[in-house]
């Protein structure tokens, strides 16, 4: 049986919940790995001479946990539709609100709490009311990616994202050294980084999801 046929059987049997569990586990392990790396780097600030990251056991452990977590995303997308799996990637934010105060001793504000509740509510809504049917995106094929004329809107969006990514990276790089000048006027560093950072992060995350979805689609064809 092909991976696509196996995935269809899994969906028919309600195994999409296993896919949901896989993506939740992936987000948890990914955040734990990043937190271990950050903790290791923080501990090195008081050392002299300071060890490089690859010489720190805790940093290496965090990197290993982070890398091991990502194959779970492929499994999750095989068992459940992307319309459910992709939004659940936000659960990493929820895990971060737990690990950061406990491990990194970072402050957890009331605004963080409200934002976490909104993210958690959205994730619950996606699982309860999202499409659980096989083939939620039957038009997404490898041939679609190789033939832009079949879906020009998709490729226009890709170009818009690419241009936005370049502009956002430029703003982030320039504002590291001073205020950004736009039309002869200085733009606040805070406002410039404020809009460019989420744009860049969101585009990178979306392209990551697109790559994984393309990979799993290629396996099923």
Image (spheres, rainbow, N blue to C red):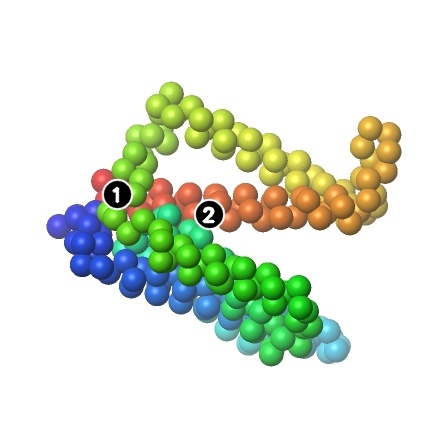
Q: Which numbered circle lies on residue 58?
A: none
In-front residue for pair 110/186? 110
Residue that extends furthest to the top in the rendered view of this protein: 149
Pinpoint residue 108: horizontal percent, then vertical percent.
66, 71
User: Left or right: where does residue 179 sit relative to residue 219?
Assistant: right
In-front residue for pair 194/213? 194
Is the Cβ of the residue at disc 1 closer than 8 Å to that at disc 2? no
- Judge whether residue 73 can be spotted in this image: no
Pinpoint residue 185: horizontal percent, then vertical percent.
86, 33
User: Left or right: where does residue 196 sit relative to residue 120?
Assistant: right
Q: In which quarter of the image is the C terminus?
A: top left
**Which residue does the image show at 60% across and 38% down from the upper left?**
165
User: Left or right: where does residue 202 sit relative to residue 28?
Assistant: right
Figure quadrant of residue 168: top right
**Which marked residue is nearer to the observer: mark 1 or mark 2?**
1
**To which residue does mark 2 refer?**
208
Element type at marker 2?
helix
Element type at marker 1?
loop
**To which residue does mark 1 refer?**
135
Residue that extends furthest to the left in the rendered view of this protein: 1
In-front residue for pair 118/45? 118
Figure quadrant of residue 214: top left
Residue 35 against residue 149 in the figure, above or below: below
**Which residue does the image show at 40% across and 67% down from the upper left?**
25
Question: Could you classify mark 2 by the number of other residues whose Cα lies within 10 Å: few (under 14), some (14-19), or many (20 or more)?
Answer: few
Measure the alpha-carbon separation of dots 1 and 2.
21 Å
N-terminal label among 1 and 2: 1
User: Left or right: where does residue 125 sit relative to residue 55?
Assistant: left
Residue 19 against residue 33 in the figure, above or below: above
Pinpoint residue 164: horizontal percent, then vertical percent.
61, 35
**Which residue does the image show at 13% across and 50% down from the upper left?**
1
Figure quadrant of residue 18: bottom left
């Amino acid at each position: 049986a092909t991976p696509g046929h196996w995935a269809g059987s899994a969906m028919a049997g309600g195994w999409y919940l296993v896919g949901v569990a896989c993506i939740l586990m992936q987000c948890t392990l990914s955040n734990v790995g990043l937190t271990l790396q950050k903790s290791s780097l923080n501990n090195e600030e008081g050392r002299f001479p300071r060890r490089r990251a690859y010489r720190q056991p805790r940093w290496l452990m965090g990197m290993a946990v982070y890398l091991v977590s990502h194959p779970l995303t492929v499994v999750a997308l095989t068992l459940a539709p992307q319309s459910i799996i992709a939004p659940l990637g936000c659960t990493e934010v929820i895990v971060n609100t737990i690990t950061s105060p406990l491990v990194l001793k970072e402050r957890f504000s009331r605004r963080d709490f409200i934002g976490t509740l909104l993210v958690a509510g959205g994730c619950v809504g996606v699982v309860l009311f999202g499409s659980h049917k096989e083939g939620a995106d039957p038009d997404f094929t490898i041939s679609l990616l190789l033939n832009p004329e079949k879906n020009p809107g998709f490729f226009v969006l890709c170009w818009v994202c690419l241009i936005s990514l370049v502009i956002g990276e430029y703003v982030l790089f320039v504002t590291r050294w001073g205020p950004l000048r736009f039309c002869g006027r200085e733009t606040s560093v805070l406002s410039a980084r404020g809009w460019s950072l989420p744009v860049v992060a969101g585009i990178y995350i979306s392209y990551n999801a697109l790559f994984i979805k393309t990979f799993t689609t290629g396996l099923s064809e």
